[in-house]
């Protein structure tokens, strides 16, 4: 077994959880790295080892109970100590986890039993594996794989080439023998050290509230989420794109004790009206410093791919925007910013899937037909495609099994994706036969036991888009923290998600209004003229320019392709595609998963800083 310091040589944050068993004494030292700390069970044995900021953890104890909240949460040590004194067993954490605002891991040791859980959103994950004689949990899969000398799972690499990766395969780690806990679940480690079980602590709320009832709850939850980041004062940076999501976060942040620096990146497209809307919002916030970056200095999509060395525990399509994500962190940090807030997630929680109309058509046919006519006009859906999608009554596991047989088929029509269980996963012509066989086998295995995330297609689609989003943002948070200024996205806090999902879908998604939930929730907080925006910049010109600019980098990427060495892609086809950046299909980001996998494999093979170099 190797030490975690061999993997994390740059000071990245992490934590590992051990059961209260004597065998832990032989395993825990493997997870020590420079700057790491260790907290103990009541027995004195190691409980938590890792690196974290002083303001990133709250720890409390009462008798033989230990509690730790790791991440962003406004709970105090006194409040947490009170909760620790109330706990009689680890099952009592359910209520605490459902009350606390923010985004955090919750770890407990109660009379020898240990429980660790992340967020229902999937932004904070839990993984586990057996090392020696004990089961060990961590927030990062790569640390466990490294310490256990686990082998890379080529089948999971093939799965990550899919566009998109469907539930439940997104929750599978990239190494054999390392297991992931699905969001909303918790891992319980028994005192014997060898036994671990998963319990469910979160389920989505029933969507039963009216918009009038639910909007105040959304405002309350989002306000608490932003307050959790601004309450300690100092300087807080906010993205201000001009869209409803980032504008809402900026106005809420401006109400708090922190000084706010709002920043805007203009788009390359002359039709992009983000800057105009951002300036309109900033005019109502004279106490907020508004910074507009030079558009010519903005890194393009795909920039810097060859230089990425972030140690991540899974591939991510977020690699494509990494250079842009990090480009303004240094000037914002120079202004004293301690955190950067984004509006990411607003599209995923304040809106919802048109697939809800599949169930609405059966419950409220006249209402649903009116809405569907509106969506057909809005998206130019063909009538035949709509009829087929609405008539499809396959359960999720059958849909997934059928998708396995069609991974090499052309992309499904947009109406099929919008009104069904989701976009059927696809591999493209640069994927080899071996990749298709591995991905197909994984899909078929998953389909045997797969259950949807929700009771209807719409509920499933809503949750899947949140989980898909947070897998990207989780990695962006790690990248930005490593670069010196962490980003956080209040819309993706569990309490905000719950408030949004509790509103009836017929009032959340409609062809007649743009983001009605957020517009109603922010009334009185955001000026009416800023809430009137109904457009959204697409940044397609930025992506196209990036493809043209990095043709040489992409050819170099594919010439030395690790994926090709593993037999999963055809490097010649990819090199040829790199020479044709105007290929129409590339506008749909179908290349993103392959690039994400390739870059991730390269980061695994790059040497880490040694412990002495740290």
Image (spheres, rainbow, N blue to C red):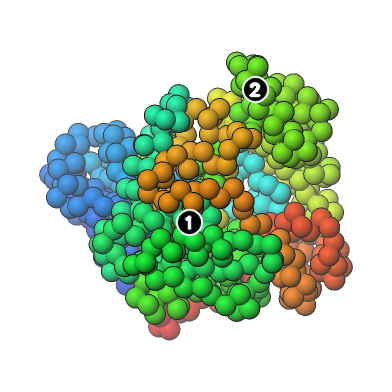
Q: Kindly tell me whether residue 363 is visible in this rendering.
A: yes
Question: Circle 2 sits in a helix, a strand or a loop, which is it?
Answer: helix
Question: At which x and y percent is residue 90?
Answer: 28, 37
Residue depicted at 69% across the width and 62% down the height:
271
Question: At which x and y percent is residue 491?
Answer: 44, 49
Q: Nearer the viewer, residue 602 or 504?
A: 504
- Image quadrant where residue 89 sits: top left
- Image quadrant where residue 599 sits: bottom right
Question: Circle 1 sits in a helix, a strand or a loop, which is it?
Answer: helix
C-alpha distance separating marks 1 and 2: 31 Å
Is disc 2 surrounded by few (<14), some (14 to 19) or many (20+) residues within 10 Å? many
Is disc 1 surrounded by few (<14), some (14 to 19) or many (20+) residues within 10 Å? many
The reply to whether dot 1 and dot 2 touch (C-beta < 8 Å) is: no
Q: Quadrant of the C terminus?
A: bottom left
Residue depicted at 74% across the width and 35% down the height:
377
Residue 73 to residue 487: above or below: above
Q: Nearer the viewer, residue 103 or 3?
A: 103
The residue singled out by tag 1 in the image is 246
Question: At which x and y percent is residue 353?
Answer: 61, 36
Earlier residue among tags 1 and 2: 1
Left or right position of 396 against 532: right
Q: Kindly tell me whether residue 26 is visible in this rendering.
A: no
Question: At which x and y percent is residue 140?
Answer: 46, 57
The numbered mark at residue 110 is none
The numbered mark at residue 368 is 2
């Amino acid at each position: 077994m190797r030490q975690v310091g061999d993997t994390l040589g740059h000071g990245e944050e992490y934590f590992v959880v051990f059961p209260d068993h004597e065998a832990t004494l032989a395993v825990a030292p493997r997870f020590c790295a420079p700057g790491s700390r260790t907290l103990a069970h009541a027995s004195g044995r190691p409980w938590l080892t890792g690196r974290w900021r002083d303001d990133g953890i709250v720890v409390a104890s009462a008798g033989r109970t230990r509690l730790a909240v790791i991440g962003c949460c406004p709970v105090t040590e006194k409040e947490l100590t009170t909760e620790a004194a109330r706990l009689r067993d680890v099952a009592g954490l359910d209520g605490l986890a459902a009350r606390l605002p923010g985004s955090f891991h919750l770890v407990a040791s109660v009379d020898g039993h240990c429980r660790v859980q992340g967020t229902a959103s999937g932004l904070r994950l839990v993984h586990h594996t057996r090392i020696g004689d004990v089961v060990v949990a961590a927030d990062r899969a790569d640390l466990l794989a490294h310490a256990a000398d686990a082998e890379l799972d080529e089948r999971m690499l093939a799965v990550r080439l899919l566009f998109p990766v469907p539930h439940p395969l997104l929750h599978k780690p990239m190494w054999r023998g390392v297991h992931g806990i699905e969001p909303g679940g918790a891992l319980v480690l028994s005192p014997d050290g060898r036994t671990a079980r998963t319990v469910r602590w979160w389920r989505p709320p029933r969507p039963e509230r009216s918009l009038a009832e639910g909007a105040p709850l959304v405002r309350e939850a989002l306000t608490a989420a932003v307050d959790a980041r601004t309450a300690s004062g100092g300087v807080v940076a906010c993205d201000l794109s001009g869209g409803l999501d980032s504008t809402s976060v900026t106005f809420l942040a401006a109400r708090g004790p922190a000084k706010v620096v709002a920043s805007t990146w203009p788009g390359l497209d002359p039709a992009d009206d983000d800057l105009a809307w951002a300036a309109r919002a900033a005019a109502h916030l004279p106490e907020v410093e508004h910074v507009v970056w030079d558009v010519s200095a903005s890194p393009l999509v795909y920039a810097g791919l060859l230089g990425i060395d972030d140690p991540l525990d899974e591939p991510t399509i977020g690699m494509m925007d990494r250079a842009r994500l990090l480009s303004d962190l240094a000037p914002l940090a120079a202004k004293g910013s301690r955190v950067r807030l984004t509006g990411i997630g607003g599209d995923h929680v304040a809106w919802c899937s048109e697939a809800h109309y599949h169930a609405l058509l059966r419950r409220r046919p006249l209402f649903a037909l009116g809405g569907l006519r509106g969506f057909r006009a809005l998206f130019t859906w063909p009538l035949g495609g709509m009829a087929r999608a609405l008539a499809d009554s396959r359960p999720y596991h059958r849909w997934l099994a059928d998708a396995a047989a069609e991974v090499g088929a052309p992309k499904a029509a947009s109406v099929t994706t919008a009104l069904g269980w989701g976009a059927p996963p696809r591999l493209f012509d640069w994927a080899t036969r071996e990749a298709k066989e591995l991905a197909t086998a994984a899909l078929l295995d998953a389909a045997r036991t797969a259950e949807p995330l929700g009771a209807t297609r719409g509920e499933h689609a809503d949750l899947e888009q949140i989980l898909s989003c947070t897998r990207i943002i989780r990695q962006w948070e790690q990248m930005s923290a490593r670069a010196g200024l962490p980003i956080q996205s209040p819309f993706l806090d569990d309490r905000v998600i719950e408030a949004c999902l509790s509103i009836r879908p017929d009032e959340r998604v409609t062809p007649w209004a743009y983001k009605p939930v957020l517009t109603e929730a922010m009334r009185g907080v955001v000026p009416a003229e800023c809430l009137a925006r109904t457009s959204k910049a697409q940044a397609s010109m930025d992506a196209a320019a990036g493809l043209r600019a990095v043709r040489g980098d992409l050819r170099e990427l594919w010439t030395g392709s690790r994926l090709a060495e593993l037999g999963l892609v055809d490097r010649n086809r990819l090199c040829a595609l790199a020479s044709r950046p105007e290929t129409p299909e590339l506008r749909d980001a179908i290349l993103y998963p392959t690039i994400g996998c390739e870059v991730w494999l390269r980061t695994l093979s790059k040497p880490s800083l040694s412990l002495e170099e740290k």
